[in-house]
Image (spheres, rainbow, N blue to C red):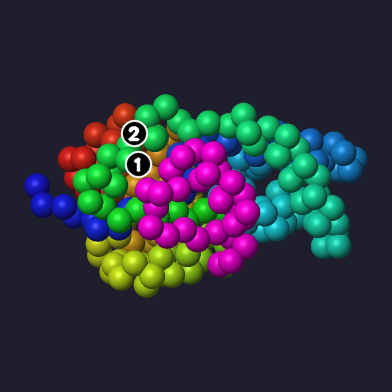
Amino acid sequence: MARQFDLICFDWDGTLLDSAGAIVGSIMAACADLDLKPPSDQRARHIIGLGLRDALMTALPELPAHRYPEVAERYRFHYLQQDHELSLFAGADSLVRALAERGHCLAVATGKSRQGLDRALASSGLAGCFQATRCADECHSKPHPQMLEELMEALLVGPERTLMIGDTTHDLQMAANAGVAAVAVAYGAHPRAGLEAQSLLYCADSIAELSEWLFANA
């Protein structure tokens, strides 16, 4: 089968890195530090993938705007306490390396900050596999298409030859807004039902399923 996609863009948290639990826990801990009513677990998981300010505004919509920076500071404190303990999903390293060896151009479009992604790429050992990356503190937050549009422009690949892979509806909506095909993974932050309500080619329950689909169809 001829290769269908030249550029494959991955989300990071919840797609390649097993970090959804740490993100939710850090939001809850930040709220506890500041005596704020925490969001529900479901609401906290829903904001994963957004830029931090957009995420906090969604998770804590009644909070006065001037208080978001202090919540963000406490969130970062708690997340960084466990950042070094987080690991890629089993099989993610092999998948990324195999796709790169196959000749696909690979990129990352993430809600992480530039500093956070650079730290994660370095610790994972995958930095050399990605030709370009975009983060929420240098682009509009998902589901705005800017991250994908900039990646496609930088790597000279059109929407019809680009695939987005993510674990949240924000990822899938960003892909749709950019005119890009999407594949979802149901082992991350958002439940399968919400993912399948979006426009997508496939929904994988594991890295193994994702890998099998990609090598058969991408």
**Chain part drawn in magenta:** 112-139
Pick the front one: 44 or 71: 71
Q: Amino acid at mark 1?
A: Val
Pick the front one: 100 or 212: 100
Count of number-bearing discs: 2
Whether 115 is among the magenta residues is: yes
Q: Which residue is mark 2?
A: 94
Q: Which residue is mark 1?
A: 96
Dividing the picture into quadrants, the one containing residue 181 is: bottom left
- Considering every residue shown, the one lying at the far right of the view is 35
Image coordinates of residue 206 in percent, x first then y, are 37, 30
Residue drawn 71% across the image and 49% down it: 59
Residue drawn 81% across the image and 57% down it: 69
Whether 134 is among the magenta residues is: yes
Dividing the picture into quadrants, the one containing residue 43 is: top right
Q: Residues within 10 Å of mark 2 (few under 14, many from 20)?
A: few
